[in-house]
Every structure is written in C-alpha cells, then in structure tokens.
C-alpha cells in the first residue's frame, strides 16, 4: 500500500508542538477520561494520543483529525515496528522525526518501538474513533493482518513479552529480611506483606489503600475492603469478593507499622521525610521502587517491579496446589487466560505427567 505521497520531504519536517492536541484528539481524550476511573489508564491514553498527534504532524505536516485514513495507520505500523531485511532490522520512521519525538520527550529513545507499545497506541486510537462514532481504520483488515504478521515475525526472531520476575514465598522472605526496625523498615515490611498476602495487589491498589477500608478482626488478622481495582473500576460487582484477608505475619507487620507511624486516617502507606515525619501517600511508582530497592539489597537476580508481587502470589498459589478459583477470588482476575500462565508455571513440576520416569532404574 503506497502512502508516501501523503508525506512532505523529510528535510522539511515542521517543528513538533508536543504539548498541544488538536481539537478532535483533545475531545477524544476528554471523553475517554470521563469514562476511565483508573489514573494509570488516563495517563496512558493521554500519552498515546499526544504521540499520535505529534507523529502525524511531523509525518504529514498537518494537524491530526478523526477519522484517520487507514493508510495512515498502516504507515504508523511500518514506521515503528522493526522488520528483518538484508541490512538487518529496519523500520521506516525518518531519523529527523525520530530525533524530534525524542527531544520532545514523547519517545524514550531513538529506534523502533516495542510491538506491544504499537498495539497499545493503535488500540487507543481505535477507542477514540469508537467514542467519536467515526469509521474505525484500526479495525480494517489490512491493519489487523499487518499486526498479525508483525507478531508472527517477532516470535520467529525470538522476541518474547517481557515479564517482571515473580516474587514467590522464598523471594518475599528475602525482601522482608532486608527490612530493619526503623520506620522505613517497618513500612516496607508491612507494604510487601500487605501487597502479597491480600491477593497480589497491583502497585496502584497498594498506593490507594486507605485506613477507612481496613478493619481489624482479630489479634493477628485484618480485612481490607478493595473498593476499586483495575477489573472493578466502578466498585465491587455482585460476582467480586472485595474483602481481602491479611493474616499472621502480614497482620503483625501491618499492625507494627500503623502503631509506629501513628496513622489513623488516609493512605496506609506513606512517604517518610528525613526528619522522621510521615508524609503523604506513596505513588504507584514509589511502590515499584521499594520492591526493586529491597530486591537489590537482598542480592536477588531478576527484573523486579510492582507486578512481581502479583505474579508471585499466583505462582506460589499454583506451586502449593491452591485451586485457581480461590486464587482468582483474591486477585480479582476475571479472565482465566490472563492468570493461567502464572498458575501453570507455579505448579509445573507437580504435574503428574512430569513424573512418568520417576520409578525408572
């Protein structure tokens, strides 16, 4: 499909206006934000649409407007997805435009994007068209076929989706062992146990945890009511199990933190100032940083982050033979497909079919 006729010469690319969105894209952002309860979703959608607006302006010398032609979406794919050629991996994004996008902080680094990033940005543009009730180029057969081929090519090159290293029971013990009895140590110990024991909470859910939703039911037991999650953005549904138990050592750690910090209302997990004062609630990014910092102190190898506790909870559950429905009731997963990989990984060595040679001489 030839679409280069739509483009100005690379040497005459206009300066990007990274902090502005055209009216149609801005309206789409507003409609999406009005529907989305998740702050993370809000940020990612706004970021994706800003990138679309800047890329389109730089590529075609005009402001983006909906509906976007199908050929433009195809060009977006070939501009950003690497493909193998005789000279190695190549893509079509002109270097001057690439440099402008990086300078405008709309791209982290020059070069092709991850396929998952391209898919996400096309999905966001698709949502914008749907909300505006416009003909959707992202659902065109040519676009869907091109993305399917790009996925297949990536797999053939040996590319795999990157996943954070799971923090199972063993790794959790190593992380907790780095926490001393300082205020920071008490906070981090409570945070790690809370995130794991309450069902592998997402970092955004840990950051949003509030005293108002926590009640003590026994000397070594709390119940935390998860009012909002990624899968329950409008609040708990009839099929959800919003009450999450925090028992045993996890309850002990949480009680110790609350006593030492004196927190009686508001966010459970807070920033700590150098003078020992307790500050405002932690951000989701700070939650991930705590996991990474504790993993480094423990000397653990791997790519750790906020999602490590969530994947580790499911993996450990599979390892200990916990039924999948029981795990999903804790994690609030609604799709078996999204959780089964972690579950199977945890129980893979316990599969009876793996022991067929167990009694071989």
Image (cartoon, rainbow, N blue to C red):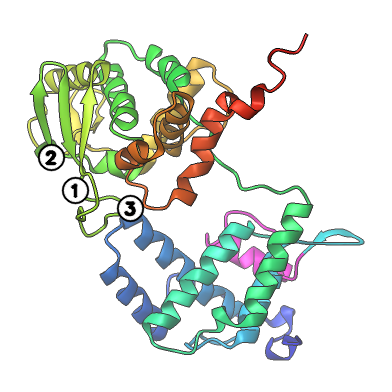
The residues colored magenta run 91-111
83 or 146: nearer the eye?
146
Mark 2, residues whose alpha carbon is within 10 Å: few (<14), some, or many (≥20)? some
Identified at 53% across, 62% down, the residue is 106
In the rendered image of this protein, does residue 15 appear above or below residue 180? below
Mark 3 — residue?
Answer: 230
Instruction: Say which of 142 and 268 sits in front.
Output: 142
Displayed quadrant of residue 252: top left
Q: Quadrant of residue 188?
A: top left
Q: For this rendering, which residue is in front, 14 or 4? A: 4
Is residue 74 within the magenta segment? no
On the image, the x and y values in percent for residue 43 come to 38, 60
At numbered mark 1, what does the secondary structure look like: helix, strand or loop?
Answer: loop
Q: Earlier in the sequence, mark 2 or mark 3?
A: 2
Q: Is residue 207 above or below residue 186?
A: below
Q: Counting residues from the N terminus, which is met first, the one under dot 1 or under dot 2?
A: 2
* Label disc, if present, on residue 169 of the rendered structure: none
Mark 1 is surrounded, within 10 Å at the Cα level, by few (under 14), some (14 to 19) or many (20 or more) other residues, namely: some
Q: Secondary structure at mark 3?
A: loop
Q: The C terminus is located in which quarter?
A: top right
Q: Are marks 2 and 3 in contact (CB under 8 Å)?
A: no
Residue at the outermost top position? 361
The quadrant of the picture occupied by the N terminus is bottom right
User: As displayed, is residue 282 above or below residue 236?
Assistant: above
Which residue in the structure is indicated by mark 2? 213
Nearer the observer, 143 or 10: 143
Q: Which mark is residue 227?
A: 1
């Amino acid at each position: 499909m030839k679409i280069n006729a739509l483009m100005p010469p690379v040497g005459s690319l206009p300066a990007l206006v990274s902090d502005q969105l055209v009216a149609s894209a801005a309206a789409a952002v507003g409609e999406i934000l009005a529907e989305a309860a998740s702050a993370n979703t809000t940020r990612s959608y706004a970021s994706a649409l800003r990138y679309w607006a800047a890329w389109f302006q730089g590529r075609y010398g005009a402001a983006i407007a909906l509906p976007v032609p199908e050929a433009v979406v195809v060009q977006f794919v070939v501009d950003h997805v690497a493909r193998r050629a005789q000279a190695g991996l190549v893509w079509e994004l002109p270097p001057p435009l690439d440099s402008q996008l990086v300078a405008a902080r709309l791209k982290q680094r020059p070069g092709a994007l991850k396929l998952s990033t391209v898919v996400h940005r096309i999905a966001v543009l698709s949502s914008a068209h749907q909300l505006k009730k416009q003909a959707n180029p992202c659902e065109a057969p040519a676009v869907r076929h091109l993305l399917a081929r790009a996925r297949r090519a990536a797999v053939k090159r040996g590319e795999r989706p990157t996943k954070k290293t799971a923090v199972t029971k063993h790794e959790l013990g190593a992380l907790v062992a780095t926490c001393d009895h300082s205020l920071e140590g008490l906070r981090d110990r409570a945070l790690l146990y809370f995130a794991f024991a309450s069902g592998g909470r997402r970092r955004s859910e840990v950051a949003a945890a509030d005293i108002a939703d926590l009640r003590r039911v026994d000397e070594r037991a709390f119940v935390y009511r998860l009012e909002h999650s990624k899968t329950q953005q409008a609040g708990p549904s009839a099929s959800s199990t919003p009450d999450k138990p925090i028992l045993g050592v996890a309850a002990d750690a949480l009680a110790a933190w609350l006593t030492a910090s004196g927190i009686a209302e508001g966010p459970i997990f807070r920033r700590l100032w150098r003078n020992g004062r307790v500050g405002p609630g932690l951000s989701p990014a700070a939650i991930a940083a705590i996991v990474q910092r504790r993993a480094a102190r423990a000397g653990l190898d791997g790519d750790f982050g906020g999602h490590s506790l969530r994947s580790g909870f499911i993996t450990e559950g599979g390892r200990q033979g916990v039924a999948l429905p029981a795990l999903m009731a804790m994690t609030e997963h609604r799709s078996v497909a999204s959780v089964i990989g972690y579950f199977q990984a945890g129980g893979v060595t316990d599969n009876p079919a793996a022991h067929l040679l167990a009694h071989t001489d």
